[in-house]
Structures are given as C-alpha cells and as structure tokens.
Amino acid sequence: MNIPPPPLDDDDPHAWLAQRDALRQLHREVLDEPVPAALLAAAGAGAAPRGADAPWLRWGAMAAAVLIAFGAGWIANSQWLRATGSTARLARAVPAAQEFVHAAAVAHAVYAPEKRHPVEVAAAEQQHLVQWLSRRLDRPLRLPDLSAQGYTLVGGRLLPGSQGPRAQFMFEGAGGERVTLYVGSLDGAAGSAAGETAFRFATEGPVPSFYWVDRGFGYALAGALARDALLGLATTVHRQLENAGG
C-alpha cells in the first residue's frame, strides 16, 4: 500500500528532500516498468522525421512542386501554341494554294479556246502589257521567252483573284496549242506551305499545270500538254524569271 508523503513545511529545507523521496517511493513500480511499445513507436515517429516534416521544408516542397508544375505547363503551352500556330497557318495556306492553281486552270480553259479575243492586250503591245499588269499587281513583272521551245507570245489580260488582281500571259505553239502563265500574290503562309520555288504538279482543274511560289508570288503554267512537255516549259519559265530577278 502506498503511503502519501508528509505535508510540506515551507520553512524546513529538509522537508523538500523528504517529499521528493516519498514521491519516488510512492511510484517506484511505475518507474521500473518498461516503456510501452506504442509509446516508443509514437516517439520515434515524432522525432525521426522532424527535419522532413518541419513546416519550412513542407512549404518548400510545395513551392518546388508548384514551380515544377508551372514550368512544365509553360513549356507544354509554348509547344502547343507553336504546334497549333503552325497547323493553323498550314490549314489556311493549303486552300489558298489550291485555289490559286485551280483558278489558273479555269482561266486557261476559259480563254485559251478563244479565237478572236483570247487576250486583252496583244503581243504587239508587249511593253504596255507588262507595264500595265505590273502596276496593277504592284510588282515588276517579266515575260519569259519561249521561242526556243516553239512558243510565241499571244498577249495577256488582267484577272481577279481571291488575294488581289492576277495576270495571265498566253503563249501559242506552232500547232496551235496554247499554254498560259498565271501569276499573282500569295500570302506568306500559303507561300511557305507550297514550298518556295518548289515545283508542284496539279491535275485538279480542267487542264494540268505546274506551279511554284517565289518570294510570296505564285506562278502556274497550265496547258493541255503531256506532263513532261509541260514540265520542260515550266522549268524554262522558272529559270528565266529567276535569272531576271522576277
């Protein structure tokens, strides 16, 4: 049976020592008992991760996670914008190039068969023709010389286009076959998508054509000729215009 410690006499210093010893004796069996496993586990869990669970480390980890997520999101967003921007430009450019080539083929089909009025300005007024169309298209135009290939200039005309005025020059072979060179402005997106100076063969319109884009300007040579013959003429036209700087 535990005996309570005697009353404390504040004026007797020995009374403090006697009370301390009495308290130790009162609960000695508890002091000698082993520490429960649950308390040891709780103490270990509370002490060991003190550094990792410190508030500043927790906040630091959260801040780092936010920065990483923000950075990854920014990079992904930038890549997405570039990708979607390129896709959007391509989506706008392809129809523009297709429209240009189709318009060239249709214009050829409409005017090439004409006997009396195939052109607005005849070859006899070649200088006036080039100056007039250059002014209307706001670009210095040059005519290729296809006489070595057996084609002479018939003349040319001004035509409307989806991106401004366009010009058509007509050439005629010894057998009466005609080819037309259709020129006009194409925006930067269409030019990039079509491939600067790259030849493309198109058969979507009434007649086949070879077309290319050079410095934002489209060129399409159309005619009811075999592909190789049309390619030979287109190559000659491209080379002459490139050498002439236009």
Image (cartoon, rainbow, N blue to C red):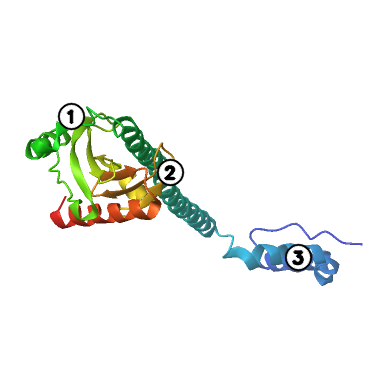
Q: Could you give the CA–CA distance between mark 3 and mark 2, rounded to whole angstroms?
A: 82 Å
Q: Circle 1 is placed at which residue position?
A: 120
Q: Position of residue 45 (x, y in %)?
A: 69, 64
Q: State which tag comes first along the sequence, 3 or 2.
A: 3
Residue 112, image quadrant: top left
Residue with the most extreme front position: 175
> Along the line of sight, which residue is nearer the eye, 55 or 162?
162
Residue 184, image quadrant: top left
Q: Circle 2 is placed at which residue position?
A: 203
| Residue 96 image label | none
Q: Left of 221 or right of it: where is 169?
A: left
Q: Measuring 71% from the left and 58% from the top, which residue is drawn there?
A: 8
Q: State which tag comes first along the sequence, 2 or 1.
A: 1
| Residue 15 is at least partly visible in this image | no
Give the class, few, some or many, for how many residues have Cα within 10 Å of label 1's Cα (few <14, many ≥20).
few
**Compared to 21, does 83 lie above or below?**
above
Check disc 2 and give the amino acid type. Answer: Thr
Q: Circle 3 is placed at which residue position?
A: 41
Check disc 3 and give the amino acid type. Answer: Ala
> Along the line of sight, which residue is nearer the eye, 157 or 215?
157
Q: Measuring 43% from the left and 43% from the top, which residue is drawn there?
A: 203
Residue 32, image quadrant: bottom right
Query: At numbered mark 3, what does the secondary structure look like: helix, strand or loop?
Result: helix
**Compared to 220, does 30 lie above or below?**
below
Give the class, few, some or many, for how many residues have Cα within 10 Å of label 2's Cα (few <14, many ≥20).
few
Query: At numbered mark 1, what does the secondary structure look like: helix, strand or loop?
Result: loop
Q: Nearer the viewer, mark 1 or mark 3?
A: 1
Q: Position of residue 81 (x, y in %)?
A: 41, 46
> Along the line of sight, which residue is nearer the eye, 159 or 2?
159
How many marks the image carries: the answer is 3
Check disc 1 and give the amino acid type. Answer: Glu
| Residue 140 is at least partly visible in this image | yes
